[in-house]
Image (spheres, rainbow, N blue to C red):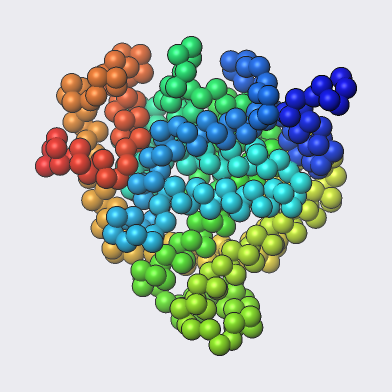
Amino acid sequence: MAQHDLTPHDEFIQRQRAWLAPCATGEWVGGARAHPEPPHPYRTCFQRDRDRIIHCSAFRRLDYKTQVFVPHEQDHYRTRLTHTLEVAQVGRDLARALRANEDLTEAVALAHDLGHPPFGHAGESALADLMVDHGHFEHNRQSLRVVDYLEHPYPAFRGLNLTSVVRECLAKHATRYDAPVCTEFDPRLQAPIEGQLVDACDEIAYTCADVEDALQAEWITREQLDGLELWRTAWRQTQRDAPHARDIHKQIRATKALLAILADDLLATTLANVSAMGLDSPQAVRKAPSKCVAFSEAAAPALRLMQDFMLNQVYTNDICLQKDAEARRGITDLFELFVERPETLPPRYQARADADGLHRVACDYIAGMTDRFCIQEHQRLIA
């Protein structure tokens, strides 16, 4: 085919083949869909996945789902949506530096929390308990269910018809607080490098953002953070770069330095791992005995110590535990009502009860709620 006969999509793929690292995932590797579609004239398959995710209703609802701090109590706290955007931003920057597939990384990052229920991990814990005898609940699995089934924008089939590799990255999403679900995908294989990158960027994004939000909420102090090597390093950099800045600006800059320290470490360690492990193809990444995307032997335990600190001082403090208990009670009340009185469910959910099971339908409905809507429904139906 002559160069002038190429579509913008074909030209981009040619440039991508020349640019991507050998271990990166091109669409010629992972672009298959359950329902075949013709190529788009100027968007790659992963760009189309990204766009479908951004335009789906589950993505919009992330705007009013709790990350850690209840969003309607203070305008500046992260929500599940802003967290998602931060993961996508860090992931895309590092993917470019690694010469991995930026579009695939971004699509996975934007979809990785679509299955999260309202009220953060308290909501997930409540639904996991309620569904223990009815097929279980886990938000990675629910994210896959959202994109495969619950979203229904096309008349010919259910789901967003995302590429197989994006779906696999969602199923294998693994962090300290997330367990991969691989019933459909071979658990002996690692996720593609882009999926591994999103996992690590998720940890970077939520750790640094939670530190910043907790400082702003005055749930922790800088003096407490001084006991952590990562924070001391970030603070020293801030003192060096802005010695005469006001304390509040130093605090803000230190949280940004914290993110940069972790991102730089992840990039350098991953590049070294790819070289040392001889990962010269996407298949080599999959068959490797361990993940290639990783923090260094110095940074990994330092990050774990910071996460332990946040667990003890923030995620399990008395205020947070009280709000978690209220959330669990509200979700449990609604779930039990929907199971006992299915007519209280919206008609489109009632229609799925025979095929999907009443408990699963009630779970799907609650998992898709925002914090605000969950509270409103509880007040309308129960309180």
Q: For the view shown, which residue lies furthest in the left direction?
A: 383
- In the picture, the quarter occupied by the C terminus is top left
Which residue is found at the position 72% from the left and 28% from the top? 9
The quadrant holding residue 124 is top left
In the depicted structure, whether residue 161 falls above or below residue 235:
above
Residue furthest to the right in view is 2
Q: Is residue 101 visible?
A: yes
User: Looking at the image, is 256 positioned above or below residue 5?
Assistant: below
Q: Position of residue 309 (x, y in %)?
A: 47, 67
The residue located at (64%, 32%) in the rendering is 46
State which quadrant residue 210 falls in. bottom left
For the point 69% across and 38% down, the residue is 192
Position of 200 with respect to 368 (left or right) is: right
Question: Which one is nearer the viewer's eye here, 339 or 77?
Answer: 77
Residue 342, position as x, y percentages in the image: 20, 22
Answer left or right for 355 relative to 276.
left
- Using residue 28 as the reference point, say whether residue 89 is left or right of it: left
State the image coordinates of residue 239 (x, y, percent, origin top left). 59, 83
Task: Name the residue located 56 percent from the left edge and 88 percent from the top edge.
Answer: 244
Residue 28 at x, y percent in the picture:
75, 26
Q: In this view, does 358 lie to the left or right of 158?
A: left
Q: In this view, does 187 lie above or below 310?
A: above
Q: How many labels does the image show?
A: 0
Q: Give the residue at the far bottom of this rendering.
A: 244
Q: Is residue 179 visible?
A: no
Q: Classify the position of the N terminus by image quarter.
A: top right
